[in-house]
Image: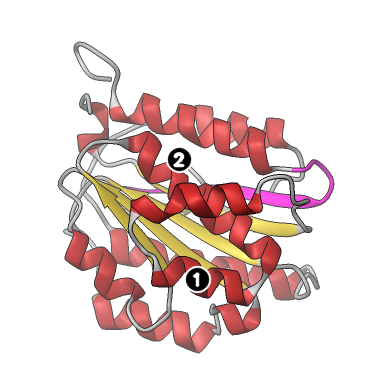
Amino acid sequence: MCGLFFGSSGTSKMKQVKENSQEFVDKLHDDGRHFGAVSEFDDTYSVGDPRKTSSRVKRDLDSLSTGGGTALYDSIIKSVLTIQHARVEGNRTAMPALLLTFTDGKENRSEHDLQDVRSAIRKAGFTPRNRCYFAIAGIGDASQQELKDVCEGGLGVYTHTDDDIEEAFKLFIAATLAVVKGRQSYAELRKNEQSKSLKVLIREFEGVEIMPMEYMLNVDTSGSMSKTA
């Protein structure tokens, strides 16, 4: 189960995120073989139902709107627990699972802290050893150190760009395609965490059939997402 997510002038960050998320779904979602879910966070967190068809995932993306602060840590914890519960309940433990989180701001609303996030990932076994993969992309005011700290020690991969949403979503494509080749390729992606390595990885995985999987796109819908990038 994988998950994804108006300014007064120009194109808002939310509009760009929706467009890039839908492109992600178009490229990588295989109807009937993949489960995709859309979750969102601002002051709180909510997650949609897992969808088998790309059209339903994109419909959920269209419904996202902005407002509130940034409960980043709470959203990661709840996403991990939601995915793991769905896998057990649906008896889909053989499928790889991805959690893909996008944010444009610093953590400022969560009840949990960084160590809670890292502990939750470990306790849930949401690691490459169990065919579970976590990636996080940030732009603008998102703290690169914060993203790095969440992923440190092999718990995930991260990237950060100034305001390039398209470049940030390249991480999600590369992370998803890395799952095709399994744990070793994900480790390679983690070792080359910065965006400059993503084009090489994408070329390497092009043309390879994506195995059945589940993913969640967890998207920051805080008020700052209404501004232009």
Residue corresponding to mark 2: 5
Tell me the residue at 24%/13% (across/down): 10
Above-or-below relation of 178 to 121: above
Disc 1 residue type? Glu
Camera-nearest residue between 104 and 64? 104
Q: How is the image coloured?
A: secondary structure
> Nearest the camera: 37 or 47?
37
Q: CA distance from mark 1 to mark 2?
A: 26 Å
Looking at the figure, which quarter contains the N terminus?
bottom right
Compared with 196, 94 (above or below) is below
Q: Eyeballing the image, is 3 above or below 135?
A: above
Q: Do the numbered discs 1 and 2 sit on residues whose CB atoms are within 8 Å? A: no
Residue at 40%, 72% in the rendered image: 191
Residue at the outermost top position: 9
| Magenta stretch, residue numbers | 30-43
Is residue 156 toward the left or the right of residue 3 in the image?
Answer: left
Q: Residues within 10 Å of mark 2 (few under 14, many from 20)?
A: many
N-term mark: 1 or 2: 2
Locate residue 135, reporting x and y percent.
44, 61
Dot 1, how many residues are within 10 Å of its Cα: few (below 14), some (14-19), or many (20+)? few
Screen quadrant of the C terminus: top left
Amino acid at circle 2? Phe
User: Where 194 falls versus 39 (above or below)?
Assistant: below
* Residue 88 circle label: none
Tell me if 134 is positioned left or right of 35 in this view. left
Q: Which residue is mark 1?
A: 188
Q: List x then y, in percent, for residue 13.
A: 30, 29
* 87 or 12: nearer the viewer: 12
Percent position of residue 51, x then y: 71, 45
Q: Of discs 1 and 2, which sits in the foreground? A: 1
Q: Check disc 1 and report its element: helix, strand or loop.
A: helix
Residue 77 pos. (x, y %): 41, 70
